Amino acid sequence: MGSESHQLHILFFPFLAPGHMIPMIDMAKLFAIRGCKSTLVATPHDEPTFLKSIARPKDSGFDIDVVTVMLPLKEVGLPEDCDNLNKVTAPEMRKQFMRAVMMLDQQLEQLMEKLAPDCLISDIFLPWTTEIAAKCGIPRLVFHGTSAFSLAGMECVRLYEPQKKVSCESEPFVVPNFPGEITMSRMQLPDFFREETEFTKFYNEAKESEKRSFGVVLNSFYELEPAYADHYRTFLGRRSWFVGPLSLCNKENEDQAHRGNQASIDQHECLKWLNSKQPNSVIYICFGSMANFNAAQLHEIAVGLEASGQQFIWVVKKDPNVEEGKEEWLPDGYESRIQNKGLIIRGWASQVLILNHEAIGGFVTHCGWNSTLEAVTAGVPMVTWPVAAEQFFNEKFVTRVLKIGVDIGVKQWVRLIGDSVKSERVEEAVKRVLVGDEAEEMRRRAKALAEMARGAAEEGGSSWSDLGALLQELRLQRLAHDKKI
Ligand code: UDP
C-alpha cells in the first residue's frame, strides 16, 4: 500500500493517572475519527475503563482498540492494587510506582515490534519512550496534558530560576522572559522547583527527552492563548500542535457519561436534578482525581456552601470505611437541610456532562488543566483553588489572562492535601462567581471562549487544521521511513 493511502497507526501510551489517561483516550478517539488506527496502552486493571470509553466510537466502526501491559508492582514492593497514581498514598510509594512504570520499557518495545505503529504519542512522564520510538524508527510525540501558558511558564522558571533570587517564600517575582508580567511566589511552585529532589532530576530528564522528540501535542486551542502558543513555539523552540479541546470528541450525553471512572450517580438522575434548576443557578464543586482535603477543610466547604444560599453539586471522595451520611466532616442534619438545594456526589461524577448543563453557573476547581479547559469549553466561570502540579499557573491563566475566574486565595503548593480555607471565603467566592455584575461579565467572556473552543474543533477550525497538518507530517515521515527500507 502506498504511504498516501496507508492508514496511519498511532500508539497512545498515557501515564497511569486519571488526569493523564482521560485526555489521552479522548485523543485516541479524535485521531480515529480523523481516519487513523488508534491503539491505547493500558494495564489490565484499567482496560475495562478504557474499553467502556471507546465502546461507542468502536461500535460506530472507528478503528480504535486497547492493548495491555503488566505493571511490575510486586518487583518494586508495591501491593497488587496500587496500579494507578491515585492509589499512591506516601512519598516512598510514589518512588516505587515511578520505578514500576519505568520497568515497562521492554514490554513497550515488544508491543511496538508486534504492532509496528507509525507514531508513538506518550506522556511526558514516560521519557524513556523517546529512545524506544527511535529504535523502532518512528517519531515520538509528547503529551503533557496542560496549556502552553503553563508549559512555557514552568519552563521559564526552570531555565531562569527566578525563585532563587527572592528573599522569602512569599515574595512575588515576575516570571522572566514570559509574556504578560505574570507574578508567582516560591510557595506556589512545585516542590521539585523549590529544592533538588529525586523528582527534579527526573523532570529535567523528561524535558530533555521532549527536546529530542518529534514534537508536542497540546490539549488546548490556539485562539485561547495565542501569545503563549507563539512563545512556546518560537521562544522556547518547541514544535507543537494544538488539537484541543479534546473533551469535545464526546458529543453525546452517553459519551460524556462514560468518560473516566464509573459515575457514582446515574446520569438520568443527575440530569433530572439539573433539569429542575434555572440556567446559571448551580455551582459545581470538584477537585479532580488526585487532590484530597482533610475532614476539617471539607467541613469548612460544607458550611460555606450552605451559607452562600446557592444551589450546588459537590463531588467528595468516597471513604469506603465510613457509612454515607456519617462522615466526620458533615455538619449535623446537613443533608436534610440542603435537600433540593444541594447534591453531594460521593465518588465520581460525569463532570463534562454536568459542566455542559445550562443550570451550571460556576465551578469551584483545583485548576487541573482538564477541568479548567472543560470549564472553558462549557462557558463556565471558575473559583480557582489550586493545590499541586502546575495548578497555580493555571489559576493565573484563568484569573489574570482569561479573566473568567476569582481566586479563593490559597497561597501554598501542597502535594495532594489542599491548603486550608475558611468557610467565609468559600461563601464569598461562590456568590461572586454566581451572582451580580462581575459574575455576568465573567460569564459573558466564558461563553465567548466556549464558542471559540467549538469553532477551533470543528472542521476548518484551528485545532482541526493543526491536527490535519500533523497527520500530513506523519504521513511524510512514514514515506521517508518506507524509502529507507
Ligand atoms: N473527573 C470526572 N469526575 C470526577 C473527577 C474528575 O469526570 O468526579 C475528570 C475531569 O473531568 C477531568 C479529569 O477527571 O477530565 C481530572 O483531570 P484534571 O486535570 O482536572 O485534574 P487531576 O485529576 O489530574 O488532578
Image (cartoon, grey):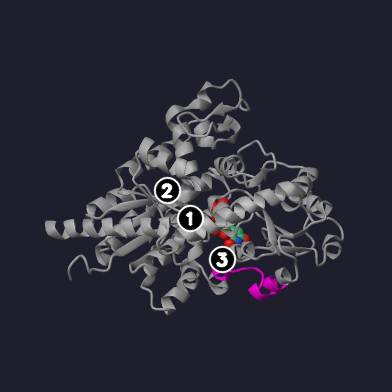
Q: Dot 2: few (<14), some (14–19), or many (≥20) neighbours within 10 Å?
A: many
Q: Name the quadrant where ligand 1 sits.
A: bottom right
Q: Dot 1: few (<14), some (14–19), or many (≥20) neighbours within 10 Å?
A: many
In the structure shown, which secondary structural element does the residue marked by tag 2 occupy?
loop
Establish if 305 lies above or below 201.
Answer: below
Residue behind mark 2 = 125
Could you tell me residue 229's position as x and y percent? 43, 44
In the image, 54: left or right of 467?
Answer: right
Establish if 459 lies above or below 400.
Answer: below
Q: Amino acid at mark 3?
A: Asn
Q: Is residue 83 visible?
A: no
Q: Are marks 2 and 1 in contact (CB under 8 Å)?
A: yes
Q: Single out the mark in the foreground, 2 or 1.
A: 1
On the rendered image, what quadrant is the C terminus found in? Answer: bottom left
Could you tell me residue 142's position as x and y percent? 37, 50
Name the residue nearer the viewer: 108 or 309. Answer: 309
In the structure shown, which secondary structural element does the residue marked by tag 1 occupy?
helix
Q: Which residues are magenta?
A: 256-272
Residue sitting at 65 percent across and 68 percent down? 264
On the rendered image, what quadrant is the N terminus found in? Answer: bottom left
Q: Dot 3: few (<14), some (14–19), or many (≥20) neighbours within 10 Å?
A: many
In the image, 391: left or right of 313?
Answer: left
Confirm or reject: label 3 Cβ below 8 Å from ligand 1: yes
Confirm or reject: label 1 Cβ below 8 Å from ligand 1: yes
Q: Is residue 203 visible?
A: yes
Residue behind mark 3 = 261
Q: Amino acid at mark 2?
A: Phe
Residue sitting at 59 percent across and 30 percent down? 185
Residue behind mark 1 = 20
In the structure shown, which secondary structural element does the residue marked by tag 3 occupy?
loop
Could you tell me residue 32's position as x and y percent? 37, 68
Could you tell me residue 120's position as x and y percent? 32, 57
